[in-house]
């Protein structure tokens, strides 16, 4: 039995019911870059323990949403609540305390090329804790085992495929057993087989560790596979949020166009790069 089979077997044993409490909440959030408005009066709730997938055209503000949630950006106005704390006015020390319970998987993995796989996985632990080295090594092994990369501690990122880099990025994100994991285009640039592997890892991480996950993606197959709810962004706002089944039945022409991938000429397409 391989590691993925073990993980998916444990999913069924450790599956937990989604709670009704809210882990992340945005209230009337506005965000602009210079003269360009990105978000306008955005309201959003992410329930504790759920996987919320955010979709929408390029330039709709999806990645900006993630960076606001983790405090890499500050809104022009509005409130951002994470695990019961309003973070938009926190200083860097306060944000670092919040980030100890958050992990992020970046679109291009964002591994440090000069560090081994193990050093990459341990980076956040060494930054945010005073954990003894023997315990850090145990966490590295556990995290890599979870993503099917056991024994790769001493490999350099340059020796890894794109899919393996994504898995190392996920191992780093979950090393401190966070409450929240944010994913920015986790299947971007991957072949269908590796995309399926990443989707299974996202689901198993959510259920085994009980994390709250927010996933930005253009991949509708991935969205329908992993989501508890799907939110669509368009024209600076969230225009629809629903379960996957409800989303498939949506009568909103923008939603239907995005799902089908076929442009309806009567619907404007915003081009923002």
Image (cartoon, grey):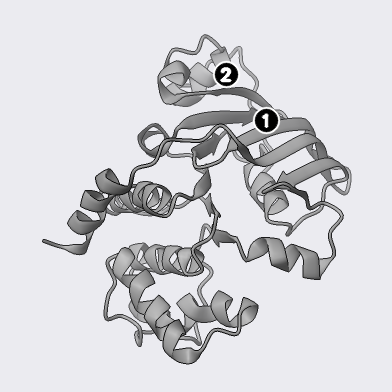
Residue 131: name its quadrant. Answer: bottom right
Q: Quadrant of the C terminus?
A: top right
Q: State whether residue 32 appears in this view.
A: yes
Residue for badge 1: 270
- Does 134 appear above or below 18? below
Q: Please tell me whether mark 2 sits on a helix, a strand or a loop.
A: helix
Depth check, front residue: 178 or 64: 178
Q: Give x and y (percent) for residue 84.
A: 72, 46
Question: As drawn, is 240 to the left or to the right of 98?
Answer: left
Query: For the view shown, which residue lies furthest in the bottom direction?
Result: 133
Residue visible at 87% across and 55% down in the picture? 89
Q: Please tell me whether mark 1 sits on a helix, a strand or a loop.
A: loop
Q: Give x and y (percent) for residue 142.
A: 35, 72
Between disc 1 and disc 2, the foreground one is 2
Depth check, front residue: 203 or 179: 179
Residues at circles 1 and 2 in contact by the CB criterion of under 8 Å:
no
Mark seen at residue 113: none
Residue for badge 2: 254
Residue visible at 52% across and 57% down in the picture? 107
Q: Give x and y (percent) for residue 11.
A: 29, 48
Query: For the view shown, which residue lies furthest in the top direction?
Result: 251
Q: State whether residue 158 appears in this view.
A: no
Q: Quadrant of the N terminus?
A: bottom left
The disc, 1 or 2, on the residue closer to the chain's N-terminal end is 2
Question: As drawn, is 238 to the left or to the right of 200?
Answer: right
């Amino acid at each position: 039995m391989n590691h993925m089979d073990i993980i998916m077997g444990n999913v069924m044993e450790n599956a937990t019911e989604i709670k009704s409490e809210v882990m992340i909440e945005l209230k009337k959030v506005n965000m602009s870059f210079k003269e360009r408005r990105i978000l306008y009066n955005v309201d959003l709730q992410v329930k504790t323990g759920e996987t919320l997938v955010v979709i929408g055209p390029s330039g709709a503000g999806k990645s900006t949403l993630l960076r606001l949630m983790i405090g890499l950006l500050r809104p022009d106005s509005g409130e951002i609540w994470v695990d019961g704390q309003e973070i938009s006015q926190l200083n860097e020390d306060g944000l670092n305390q919040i980030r100890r319970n958050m992990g992020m998987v970046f679109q291009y993995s964002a591994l440090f090329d000069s560090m081994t796989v193990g050093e990459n996985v341990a980076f956040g632990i060494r930054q945010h804790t005073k954990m003894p080295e023997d315990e850090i090594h145990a966490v590295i092994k556990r995290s890599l085992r979870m993503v099917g990369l056991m024994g790769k501690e001493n490999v350099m990122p340059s020796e890894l495929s794109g899919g393996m880099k994504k898995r190392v990025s996920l191992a780093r994100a979950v090393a401190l057993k966070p409450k929240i994991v944010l994913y920015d285009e986790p299947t971007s640039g991957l072949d269908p087989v590796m995309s399926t592997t990443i989707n299974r890892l996202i689901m198993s991480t959510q259920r085994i560790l009980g994390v709250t996950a927010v996933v930005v993606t253009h991949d509708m197959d991935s969205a329908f596979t992993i989501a508890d709810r799907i939110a669509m962004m368009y024209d600076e706002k969230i225009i629809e949020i629903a379960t996957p089944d409800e989303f498939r039945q949506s009568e909103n022409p923008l939603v239907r166009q995005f799902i089908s991938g076929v442009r309806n000429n009567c619907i404007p397409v915003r081009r923002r790069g």
